[in-house]
Image (cartoon, grey):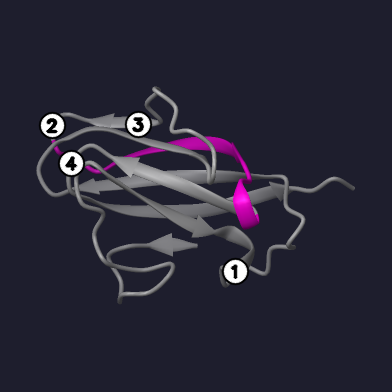
Amino acid sequence: MVDTRGSAGPFGGPILGGGTSRDFAVPSSPCNIPSGVQACSLNVTVVPAKSLGYLTIWPAGQPQPFVSTLNSWDGRVAANAAIVPAGQNGAVSVYVTDDAQVVLDLNGYFTAQ
């Protein structure tokens, strides 16, 4: 669904800068997700430029949580599964402490019905 290593665009590059967040509108992705999505099952992968304190993912439009979805202190590619409620416009927000590429693979989604 998202790969910031690719060309610039809403689901591609650029790299996420350290200390910044970016929103990804899941229903607008090429994955054919309905607009009423309630939550997404995601595989979150990070490709740090050097090391990464942490990455966190949460519903867009809500306050950023003080939790880590994954870490990569030694700079290795790391991945973790997460179920994330959909936020504003069905979007999720991603924050990284340090420069990193991010890949979000959609495993499934939840709807009200």
Is residue 63 on the magenta stretch?
no
Is tag 3's residue or tag 1's residue first in the polypeptide sequence? 1
In the image, 110: left or right of 40? right
- Eyeballing the image, is 92 above or below 9? above
Amino acid type, callout 3: Leu
Specify start and end residues of the magenta stretch as a single range. Answer: 75-89
In this rendering, would 24 be left or right of 77? right
Where is residue 44? Give x, y as percent: 42, 44
Of 76 and 87, which appears nearest the observer?
Answer: 87
Label 1: state its secondary structure: helix
> How far apart in space, not on screen, are marks 3 and 1 (Cα)?
25 Å
Q: Amino acid at mark 1?
A: Ser
As rendered, which of 80 and 37 lies closer to the eye? 37
Find the residue positioned furthest to the left.
50
Q: Which residue is mark 3?
A: 70
Identity of the residue furthest to the right in this view: 113
* Residue at image mark 4: 98
Residues under labels 1 and 4: Cα distance?
27 Å
Residue drawn at point x = 64 percent, y = 63 percent: 27
- Give the x, y percent position of residue 78: 30, 39
Query: What residue does disc 1 label?
Result: 28
Left or right of residue 57, residue 50 in this image:
left
The CA span between labels 2 and 3 is: 12 Å
Residue beneath the point at 63% across and 46% down: 86
Circle 2: residue type: Asp
Up/down of 89 relative to 11, above or below: above
Give, as a three-letter code, the residue at label 4: Asp
- Residue on which disc 2 sits: 74
